[in-house]
Amino acid sequence: MDTVIEVRGLVKKYKELTAVDNLDLDVKKGEILGLLGPNGSGKSTTINCILSLLKKDAGTVKIFGEPMSPDAYEIKRRIGVVFQDVGVYDELSVYENIDYFCGLYISDKAKRKELVERAIDLVSLNDFVKFKPKKLSGGLLRRLNIACGIAHRPEIIILDEPTVAVDPQSRNSILEGIKKLNDEGSTIIYTSHYMDEVDFLCDDIVIIDKGKVIAKGTSEELKDMITMNEKISFTSKNLNDDVITKIKAFEHLLSYENKDGSVKLSFDHGDGYLMNLIKLLDDNGIRYSSLNVEKPSLNDVFLELTGKDLRD
Ligand SMILES: Nc1ncnc2c1ncn2[C@@H]1O[C@H](COP(=O)(O)OP(=O)(O)OP(=O)(O)O)[C@@H](O)[C@H]1O
Ligand SMILES: [Mg+2]
């Protein structure tokens, strides 16, 4: 597969703070790459350095095999960016905003009309085309921001946390829209601190913390990297000390947590713990409900690698 973006040894400092620290990144043609990291981990700084909007302190960035620079306009034309902060014109309507941004790339009127309408469809803003941005809810405004960034059908689309502070309906619409853009051929970089979104959307995931790549791979590969293999939870009101001792003695048990009868267990490699647990509970007459088995999440990966939660 072709690499469309290649970043090597990227460093960006803000005075004493190293916001991006020797970062490597490869984005393959046709994929959705997730850049996952907590607040302040350097996602936006990385994006801005890739786009040459910020001056890097060290490293190289190649896009479509060419070195990226502030005046690489031919490369920039082929990239659509949706910034974390919404940037639209208050005096223009939804339609006029999208038409304006699309017009920066596409001069043919008929072609532009088709593209603008397609972008409106994609983010489901059809009922709001005449609205001014100030009349839109936060979620609709974010959808407008996305439509403005992608209407010209760029080959690469970079989205920086497009779902922060949006309602669930807008969030789903945005995620579906991004999948569709990818199906239609765009290569996508998606930054987020929401692990479930990245898990759902992305082919490859790069986890960053404090400006450094701490792990990369597919969702499965990342989950295979950690010791935890399975989580089991259940609720019980009549657990006794004897049974608790037996649970704690399970082979391969990594952690045991019991909050008012809400029990969470995690295990390392291997499986079959569930059957053992059910047998133990049944044999001892313990009533239980909400029994659930889960595989590790990307949050578990982050937690095991860094010792802290990815969540806000
Ligand atoms: N213009 C700036 N001047 C000084 N420090 C900055 C500047 N921009 C960002 N930083 C700092 O650099 C680090 C990385 O910030 P960045 O915005 O790239 O992170 P992020 O992963 O995008 O975070 P968020 O999830 O909050 O958007 C943070 O510690 C931030 O406070
Ligand atoms: Mg950011």
Image (spheres, rainbow, N blue to C red):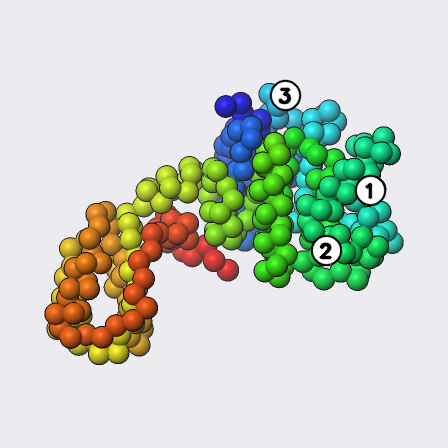
Q: Residue furthest top?
A: 65
Badge nearest the viewer, 1 or 3: 1
What mark, if any, has residue 66 been given in the picture?
3
Task: Say if mark 2 contacts mark 3, CB within 8 Å.
Answer: no
Q: Which amino acid does label 3 sit on?
A: Glu
Q: Can residue 6 be seen by looking at this rendering?
A: no
Give the x, y percent position of residue 200.
49, 47
Task: Say if mark 1 contacts mark 3, CB within 8 Å.
Answer: no
Mark 1 C-beta closer than 8 Å to ligand 2: no
Toward the viewer: 170 or 218?
Answer: 170
Task: Say which label, 1 or 3, has the lower sequence index.
Answer: 3
Q: In this view, does 274 lie to the left or right of 24?
A: left
Give the x, y percent position of residue 311.
47, 58
Q: Is residue 109 left or right of residue 244?
A: right
Task: Say if mark 2 contacts mark 1, CB within 8 Å.
Answer: no
Toward the viewer: 264 or 307?
Answer: 264
Toward the viewer: 306 or 203?
Answer: 203
Separation of marks 2 and 1 at Cα, in angstroms: 15 Å
Q: Which residue is drawn at 48% across and 52% down?
A: 196
**Residue 119 higher or lower than 29, as above or below:** below
Q: Can residue 28 be seen by looking at this rendering?
A: yes
Which residue is labeled 2 in the image? 141
Q: Which amino acid does label 1 sit on?
A: Asp
